[in-house]
Image (tube, rainbow, N blue to C red):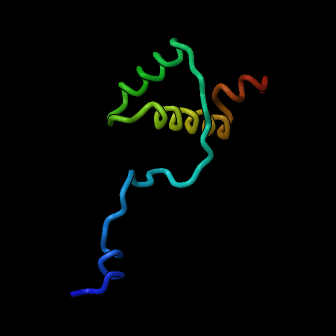
Amino acid sequence: MGSIREIRKSKPKMGRPVTTGIGVPVLLRMHDPQLAALDAWIAAQNEPISRPEGARRLIEMALEGARKGKGALTLARGT
């Protein structure tokens, strides 16, 4: 039989697994039309995703569009 340390090392960790790593929590308030648009975009995806993941993906798409010189961020700056 193994020692107590060996037994403890093999015991699975309790709780939810880390999915996105360490990050900064951000509280985002949205109105009903924004939530409806987000939910509609999520429903159109090929895989089920959560609202927070949908918001992250849309933000990343907007930032990538701004880096390429197109999208809402460049239009807001007037370029």
**In x, y percent, where is residue 10?**
31, 74
**In x, y percent, where is residue 75?**
71, 23
The answer to whether residue 22 is left or right of residue 14 is: right
Which residue is nearer to you in this view: 48 or 71? 48
Residue at x 62% of width, y 37% of height: 26
**In x, y percent, where is residue 44?**
36, 26
In the current view of this chain or complex, which residue is farthest to the front?
Answer: 4
Residue at x 67% of width, y 40% of height: 67
* Quarter of the image where the C terminus is located: top right
The answer to whether residue 29 is left or right of residue 52 is: right
Which residue is nearer to you in this view: 39 or 72? 39
* Quarter of the image where the N terminus is located: bottom left
**In x, y percent, where is residue 4?**
32, 81
Residue at x 66% of width, y 35% of height: 66
**Would you place residue 34 above or below residue 63 in this image?**
above
Which residue is nearer to you in this view: 1 or 57? 1
The answer to whether residue 69 is left or right of residue 60 is: right
Q: How many marks are shown on the rendered structure?
A: 0
**Would you place residue 74 above or below residue 16 in this image?**
above
Q: Quadrant of residue 65?
A: top right
Q: Quadrant of residue 13?
A: bottom left
In the current view of this chain or complex, which residue is farthest to the right?
Answer: 78
In the current view of this chain or complex, which residue is farthest to the top?
Answer: 33
Residue at x 78% of width, y 26% of height: 77
